[in-house]
Image (cartoon, helix red, strand yellow):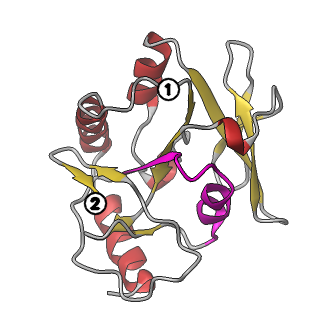
Amino acid sequence: MTKSELRKKYKTLRDALSMTQVDDLSMSIANQLLKLPIWDYSFYHIFLAIEEQKEVNTDYILNILSGKDKHIVISKSDFKLGIMTHFLLTDTTKIKKNHYNIPEPIDGIEISNDKIEVVFIPLLAFDKSGNRVGYGKGFYDRFLSECKPETIKIGLSFFEAETEITDVFEADVKLDYCVTANKTYSF
């Protein structure tokens, strides 16, 4: 299927989930993550879920990272330039939703891409080769292409892998893992 077809399919599937299902699946995804060999790093980039889009609730992962005393990095999107700026999440970080309902830091301690070692990535769909489909704005592809090559890229999905995304671009950055409630895919 094409990215456009997959976006439509998975937005519909996500819309059909109840908030209880979103929470239960999100907790299962966080528990699956605990099995991965990714916990010896220091800087972890994570997205704050857009609740209205029924994205994976990352609060459970935030609790794990906090409990393991990791540096947590979150982003602020610049829609004019199509880029994200990354900030350290601290006890004093103020979060505000932007006009797309994305929770973002107002300001804070900026963190450069080369410090980030693990990235948890939102997505709508992914395939068995590690390609992913997001909302189509390219924010994560641009961001990930500027990270160190060894940065671990982990997609989080409520749904299992598609066989193939047929219109993958050269600039699309592949995942290293994708974690669902029932399974971890390694690429």
Q: Residue 77: x and y, percent?
A: 74, 52
Residue at the disc numbered 1? 41
Q: Residue at x 49, y 15 (%)?
A: 66
The quadrant of the rendering that contains the N terminus is: bottom left
Residue nearest the observer in this picture, 170 or 108 = 170
Amino acid found under the numbered disc labelled 2: Ala
Which label sits on residue 13?
A: none
Q: Residue furthest left?
A: 182
26 left or right, relative to 117: left
What span is in magenta? 137-155
Q: Is residue 139 magenta?
A: yes
- Residue located 24% across and 43% down the image: 21
The residue at which mark 2 appears reads as: 16
Residue 2 within the segment the image draws in magenta: no
Residue in the image at 44% along x and 59% along y: 123
Task: In this rendered view, identify the residue nearer to me: 64 or 97.
Answer: 64
